[in-house]
Image (cartoon, grey):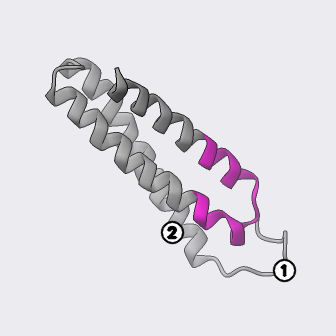
Amino acid sequence: DTLGAKIDSLFLKIIESLFIAGYLPKQDKLPYLESAVKQLDLLKFFLQMSWEIKMFDNKKYIALSKPLDEIGKMLYGWKNQVLKTPATKTGENK
């Protein structure tokens, strides 16, 4: 099913964006964090669509959506921290 494949792909893209951001200096993290935020929002949208068409039952949907909401909060916090921290010399802010 293509919706399931799209969901799987988004999970992998989010993991990839966060993995890369984790290894970059602060001044280079923002594009990857913004990408992860967008992908996470899209993932939550597709999960809701899947639930609405009965691809997931309530229990599975809740089991997936609650942790994703927490991840979203942490991700917004990380992004805001990067935005508020002034970049200094290259490699100094990690």
Q: Main secondary structure of the magenta part?
A: helix
Query: Could you say which is closer to the camera, residue 17 or residue 85?
Result: 17
Q: Position of residue 46 (x, y in %)?
A: 30, 37
Please determine whether, in this image, residue 23 is positioned above or below residue 88.
above
* Quadrant (top left, top right, bottom left, bottom right) of the N terminus: top left
Q: Which residue type carries mark 1?
A: Lys
Residue under numbered circle 1: 89
Please determine whether, in this image, residue 75 is positioned above or below residue 53.
below
Report the residue that reaches farthest toward the front.
Answer: 2
Query: Tag on residue 80?
Result: 2
Would you say residue 94 sits in the magenta stretch?
no
Q: Residue at x 76, y 65 (%)?
A: 25
Element type at mark 1: loop
Query: Tag on residue 72?
Result: none
Q: Position of residue 66 (x, y in %)?
A: 32, 35
Q: Position of residue 94 (x, y in %)?
A: 76, 63
**For the magenta stretch, what is the residue range?**
16-32
Please determine whether, in this image, residue 87 is positioned above or below residue 39.
below
Label 1 Cα crowd, 10 Å radius (few <14 / some 14-19 / many 20+): few
